[in-house]
Image (cartoon, rainbow, N blue to C red):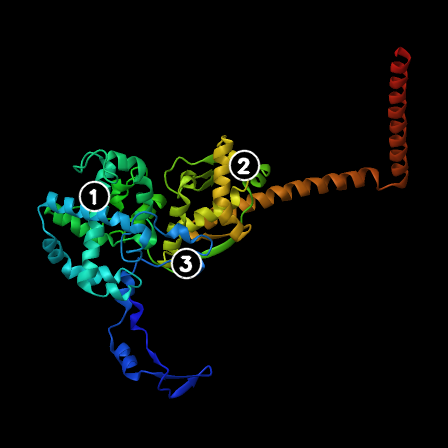
Amino acid sequence: MASENAPQIDSENPTGTMGGHLIKIQVGRLQELLDSPAEAKQWDRCCIYRVPPHLCRLNKELFRPTLVSTGPYHHGEPHLKPMEEHKFRAMRQFLERSGRTLSDLKRALEDDVSKLMDSYEELDAEWSEEAKFLELMILDGCFILEFNRVSNIPTAGGYSDSDPVFGIYGACTRSKPLFLDILLLENQVPFLLLEKLLAIENRITVDAVQYLDDFFPVFPRVYELYKEEKPAHLLDLFRTKIIGRLSRKSPPNFAVLETKPASAYSKAGIEFRESHTATISGFKLENNVLELPTYPLHIEETMRANLEVYETLHGLGGLEIHSYFRIMGGLLQSVEDVRLLGIDSSIQAEMIVNSLKVLHDGIGSFAEVESDLVPVVLRLNRYYRESGDRWKRRIREWGCNLRETYFKNPWTVMSLLGALLVISFTVVQTVFTTLSYYNIRG
């Protein structure tokens, strides 16, 4: 998906004008583009994107790796070069364990190199050479598989305990930042690559989804969902584990709804309960009790940002991650709101509020909600309105009753005022009598 196919402009031999500048369009180049195969299949394969400026303007660092680059987008950046040595060590260990050579891996993958290249939205000119691109894929794919191996069983890789990356020491000091780097959108490698490498290593067809499902041990296993298709990459697999179901490309179906703080709904009679589901699909409103899935609230801000941007750029119409955090950002605006979910720790509640505040500040009190969550939010708001209407109706009834009983006849009004006056004098007299008694005793 390289951008080098764009038409070239030659300003030295102008034949026309555009916006006051003389230009010459290379007609031969345009004809070449027109005669090229349709790009539909290429775009269908595309699943790894560069984050556009308008989506990362708040914090670009959320999308940039800190320790390791995997894939072409950040390869060669100065602060990531120290990890290259360890990537080569991982590939060497992979080859020794599998009894394969680098040439074996290249031959096994050469038929799929175009699919691997088409997975990227754009490739710089240096990666347009298939041989160089394939070597990078093999190097980074071996590193990811080796990191996954030692993450699950630190002593399984044959490394020293003091190894700075693959040993127990490395697991304590670098495991988390490496894990986050590998899951960044711009750091993805196609799942097809990992699947092929696993098959080459084991010399048999391996269920790569089941194998890599353990890369996220805290989340529920989802490999059984992938019967007829495969995840696009590890970030896509991670997203499926959070939402608990597969998503497919489709036009977004949004409803813009106003979401009030949880404390406002609570005053209207809504009770809140934390859902026990491990996915974000656990929203349920029954008998004035709203169940909320809260586990993903503790997810790293980096992961949340990359998940949202991925489903936006990839055209996943449900936008479940986006919708979940928009709704929770509207509901949980203060520590009081969070405590309604049974989270009593002030520190934890403050962390949740702060993590959601950036999102909520960007959207105000309105949330763009995907279609599956629309009924829940609509019912919640309808109950809130009806509750307010009940109080208003009751106040109006009291006012009407008072008017009909005491203010319809002028004599009744005078009697009521007289009674109120007598009561007032009685209260004043009682107060003065009490004060006089205490003054005499003093």
Mark 1 residue element: helix
Alpha carbons under labels 2 and 3: distance apart: 32 Å
Alpha carbons under labels 3 and 1: distance apart: 37 Å
Disc nearest the viewer among 3 and 1: 1
- Side of 15 relative to 351 (left or right): left
Q: Residue at x 30, y 84 (%)?
A: 27
Mark 2 residue element: helix
* Above or below, comparing residue 427 to residue 83 in the picture: above
Identify residue type, mark 2: Val
Location of the C terminus by quadrant is: top right
In the rendering, at what x and y percent does residue 426 appear?
89, 24
Q: Where does label 2 land, which residue?
A: 335
Earlier along the polypeptide chain: callout 3 or callout 1?
Answer: 1
Q: Is residue 247 visible?
A: no
Q: For the residues labelled 2 and 1, say whether their Cβ atoms are less than 8 Å apart.
A: no
- Is residue 214 or residue 91 the one in the foreground? 91
Label 2 environment density (alpha carbons within 10 Å; few <14, some 14–19, many ≥20): many
- Is residue 351 or residue 319 the one in the foreground? 351
Disc nearest the viewer among 2 and 1: 1
Q: Where does label 1 land, which residue?
A: 146
Q: Residue at x 83, y 37 (%)?
A: 406
Q: Where does label 3 land, which residue?
A: 252
Q: Residue at x 90, y 17 (%)?
A: 436
Location of the N terminus by quadrant is: bottom left
Q: Residue at x 32, y 73 (%)?
A: 6
Identify residue type, mark 1: Glu
Alpha carbons under labels 2 and 1: distance apart: 42 Å
